[in-house]
Structure formats: structure tokens, C-alpha cells
Image: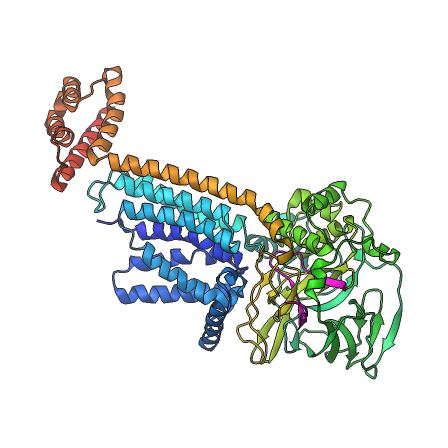
Amino acid sequence: MSRPWRPLLLGLWMSALFWPFAHAGGYNHPALLALAPFLFSGADLWHHLVLRWLTWIAALYVELSLAWSQWVLPRILGRVFGGAVHQLFFLPFQQWNQMNAHLAAPLLLLGGLLAWLIFRQCRRYGQAFGLFIVGALVIPANHVLWNLPAELALGAYLILGLFVLIDFHREGLSDGSLTVAGPRFTYGVWGVAAFIPLIIGWQTPSHHSSDPLGVFKGQILPGIRASQTLATTGYGPGITHIGRSLVASRSPVFLAKTTRATYWQAAVYSHFDGTDWTNPGSGQTYFSDPGDLGIPLITPYFAKTMPVKTVHAAITDLAAGSFPTLFYTGVPTRFSVPAVVHTASARFQPHNVRHYRLTAQVPLENLSNIRSAPFQAPAAKFSPELEIPSNLSPKVAEMAKRITASAVGPWQAAEEIKRYLDRHYRYSLTVTPTNGNVVNHFLFVDKKGYCDQFSTTFIMMMRTLGVPARWVVGYSSGQYDPSRHGYVVRAIDAHSWAQIWIPGSGWVPFDPTPGFSAPLAAQSVGGSSQPSTIGASTPPVTPTPSTNPGTTAHRRRINPGMPPGSRNTPRTARNANNVNNASTHRTASAFHLWELAALLLLVVALAALVRQNHQRSTPATRLWVQIAGISKRRLGTRWHQKSPRQWGHDWVRYFPNDADIIWPLVKLLEAAFYRGTALTQAEERELHALWLRLKQRARKKVS
């Protein structure tokens, strides 16, 4: 007789195996998405097959809606599923982690359901032990192959697996005829296990997603930190002041009709005083009218000799007021509306504008040149982009030099810093206030933050290495809306990133926030024919994230419908190898692999000991251990006999009224120990029943 709640425990166990996929994907609710197997297990509470299938379908629908943060429509589902299958076969096996996370969500959940159909067949101790070993191998393998999270997921899987093994071990027989675990203990273990995925899931949110608990505190409990200033995501006044907690807003900002997903730039800043980004001095300004054609309206940030591609876009305001600035990509050569050009910040200030068209030049980046560029002493003109605030801790420079010790050029140094921040710091909209330098507080105190903290810290580290770097604010690409034939950019898509100076290439965009990389609107030359990705150590791919500048929730959004003629936008892997830093990456990750290998060997050894002990033991021997325990309490120092008959005589001597239970119990124990054949199921049931009666009498004597 199987325990009715066991499928729920197995579902929680499989949820731990499901975590790495949910957390690495950058979904909005990774802890809830990881509980998909637990929802699947609820179907086993029904006896009718139709009700089970309906429960599975409902669980799939709910989880997919959570992954996309919108209700699933059949027409979108079909389009996304087809695109996901196409990418699955198009990408090499080792690059499956580069698939767009939201496009992969249907495949991921369907795979989770198929895996649950295997888990739910677990009926015996040996089967549970096999799943225990397989899962302990699969999680590290996913970490090695696809850089999925491993440490906490493996720990949770092993803890829950031990609970499952203990449950089967104490049950004795697969049919439940010899259940020695009390109900209080069993339900207590299940209750503790039920909270493990949620607790660890929210304590260690995905590097690519918002912190649900932090957003809850910011939106629902704004008074939980009275001394902390909250800001709303979006581009607006105060975006250059970083270090405040944020409240996510999904209000639409503008619609961008263009053929390709891209970042939308608003302004560039060079001076940082520890809390605010500014551009010292007034700089030059001039009036630009729509008659200016073909001439860059600001100094190009890329090298003059670099080939460029002309892109066009139509931007329509979706917010309540007019545009505070004109958003653009690349270097604008023409706006369809007049604007005041601020050259110091590369900002275009319009007047009462709600729609405009943009023509811009986007460089065809030569990735080979960028990756091979060596360190060079910067020219004097870059002094503003090398400025370091006086209150920056010297430990920041020490950390940067230690992280980039093996780098031979600025691009490799940038990738090493990005990789380090990705592994050791987590994303959160909720940060603690500080009166000092925000970078110091982020690195050595809070160790969490949003894109402002990541990008600013990255810039300060690059400057300590002598690499000019500056801060850029704007929006990420947003979400493609097939009905509007364009990208809807929301307040939650506001973002900040960096530009670093690469000799021979100019200012190259780099996004150090984990899970994001600034896409170029044009293809690269001298490398892959796929779209370029700046800011990630991955093969060139174009992601579609939604992030936050000093005002955004760091979330990756779905592009369910792709614009005509555009490519699917695969997700950027966190730490995929690069041609120029493959050896460095192997050295950096070797320690983690050895840790996982040692932990895995220890777990296998412990599991083998548990299994060996279980195989050697029988229901009678396990019961004899319990008899020894109660005899020590009831008989004290007189418990020293080694055989069941000696124990029986000793017990009856002091408790003669128990003779009607003791002697049949002794007879069965002797048959189990000395007869040479195992007890029958009827004998085991009788043995267990006698033992329960003896324990009940012992309790009455104590009371």
C-alpha cells in the first residue's frame, strides 16, 4: 500500500533537479517555475486518468504563463513552439544554453512533465536510490556542459533525496506492510522538505531575473525600510543617482518599429562621484533640424575607418507625456523632428514630440580586432573617462588586478570582470542605503544590486586598469508585438551599460550585468555571420532581455512573434567559452569542478553505505534495534542479553503480564534469525503487530 502523499514528496524532490533550468533561464519567477514538478505531482491525487491529464495541462499552462508573465494564447504558443524546435536543431548541443529562454520555456516544461512521468514510477527503495544517483550526476553534468547553476541545486536535491530514501527505508516493504515510521515524523519531514525549494529559490534568485521577494517588499511593504528611498523603473529625472531600491513598473514607454532588436541609447556620462553620474561643464549644444542629412549629429563613437550600416526606425510615444529625450541606436544622422543636441552627453532634447523617425549609422564591428587588441597607454583626451572618485576603496583596484591577471587586452579584462561579477554577486531591486561610495557598498557589503551597480562597478574596475570607460543609459530592446509590428518598450526595460575604449575600434558597448549583452543592430565582419553580441563571452548571438538602468527591473522578456525578416534571438549564456580566453576559463572553473567532483564522490560513498546497510538489514533486524532501545529504557543496566530468548526471559521476569506478547514475538524473531529463510509477509505483519502492542503497553506503564 503506497502512501498517498508520497507523489508530492517525489514532486518536490524533482523540483530540485528542475531548479538549474529555471534559474539559468532568467525567468521572472524562477522559484515558482522550479516547482512545476510539484504541481505535476498533484495530479496523482486523482484516481481518474482524465482528471490527471487535465491537472497536468493546467499546471503546464500556469507555469508557462508565469514564465512569460502573460496569459498564453494558442496562436502565440504555436509560433513560439515552432521557433524553439527550429533553434533546438539549429544550435549545436553544447550551445543549447544560448537558446532564448522564453522561446525554450514550452520545451523545458514539456521535458519536465516527461521527467515527472519517470519519477512517479518510483515505488521501491532501489528505484529511489537509482534516481538519487542519476540526479546527483545530471546536475554537475549540466553545470559542466551548459554552465547551469549547480551548488545549491545539488545540495537541495541530495537533502530531499535523503528524505525520500529514509521514507522508503523506514517503510521496510514496498507494499507498506511493515511501516515503522510514525505519522508525526513522516509528515514533519514532508513539511520541512516542502519549504526547501521556496526558501533556497528566493534566497538565490536567478542572475537574470528580478528578486520576487525584493519587489514584494518594495511594492507591498514600502514602509519596511523607512530610511530607504524608492524609485520607479523607467527613464526620467534622477536616473543618474544610483544606490536606491526600485519598484518595477510595466507602463509602456514607446513603440519602436525597426527590423532588428537593439538597445536604445539616451545619454552618456563620464564623471562619477560615488553616488551620481554627471558630465562636468556645460559642453557644446546646437540646434538640429530635419534638414540635416547624412552627416553624424554627434561625433561617432567608433573608428572612422570602420564600415557602417544605415538603419531606420520609427518611434512612437506610448506614455502620458511627450518624449523627455530622443532615443536612438548607433550614431544618428537624421531625426524627423528638431532637437537640441548636447554633445557632452550625446543627448538629443526635443520639444513636445510624440513621434519621430530615425536614421543612424551602426558600425560593422570587427570582433577579431576587438578581441586581439592589447593594452595601450590611453591618450590625454581620455582623462575624464579614467577619473576615479577619491572615496573609492583601494580594494577595488586590487580586486580588478587579481581578476584580470591573465588578461592580455582590454576585451579579455572586461570579460573576466563580467564573469566574476556574474558568479559572486546577485541581482536584486532591493538594496540597502549607504552614505558612502556605492561601488564599495556593492562589492564589500551588500553584494547585490541591479544594472546600475553592476555597470558602475565594472567601469570603475576597468578605469583602475587604465582602460577608458563610460556609463550609458537608455532602454533594452523591449518585447516584440506582432499586432503592432514593432517592439513595445516599457519602463521595466530601462537599462544602463558601459562603453570601453578599444584601440583601433573606438568605444565598444559592453553590458556587465549578468545575463545581458548589448546587441549591435548590424552584423559583424571578420568573424561569425550571425549577429554580434557585445558584452558577453559567447559566440555572436543577439539576446532580447529587458533590464533596468537606475530605474528598471532586471528581467528577460519573451519575443513570441518575431518581426518579418529578423532572426530568432537566442539567449546569451552566462559563462560560455571564448576563443581568446578558453584556457583562462578552464583555469578559473577547475576549482569548482574539483569541488563538485569531491562532493559527488562523498555523496556516492554515503549513498552506497546507506544502501549496503539497507540490504544487510531485514525487517526483523531493524525491529531488534528498536527492541534494544526500549529495553535499555525499561530494563536499564539489566539489558545485556544477546539472543531473543534471553531478552524474553529478562522482560517477562520484570513484566510478567506481557508474556502473551513476548513469547510469540520471540518465536518470530528466532525464526527470522536462525531458520535460514526469510519471514513470509504474513509473519512480518504479525511481527509488526506484536511489536506495536508491546510499545503501547510500555507507554501505559510509563504513564
Measured as percent of width and height from the top left, residue 58 is found at: 38, 66
**x, y (%) of residue 310?**
72, 78
**Looking at the image, which is closer to me, 657 or 405?**
405
* Residue found at the far bottom of this picture: 291
Is any atom of residue 244 visible in this view?
A: no
Magenta span contains residue 506: yes
Q: Which quadrant: the C terminus?
A: top left
Q: Quadrant of residue 479?
A: bottom right
Depth check: give the residue in front, 281 or 230.
Answer: 281
The residue positioned 15% from the left and 22% from the top of the image is 648
Count numbered badges in the picture: 0
Q: Position of residue 325 (x, y in %)?
A: 76, 71
- Does the image show residue 57? yes
Q: Is residue 247 left or right of residue 64?
A: right
Whether residue 639 is situated above or below residue 325 in the rendered picture: above
Question: In terms of image quadrants, where is residue 180?
Answer: top left
Does the magenta-highlighted stretch encompass residue 104? no
- Magenta range is 505-527
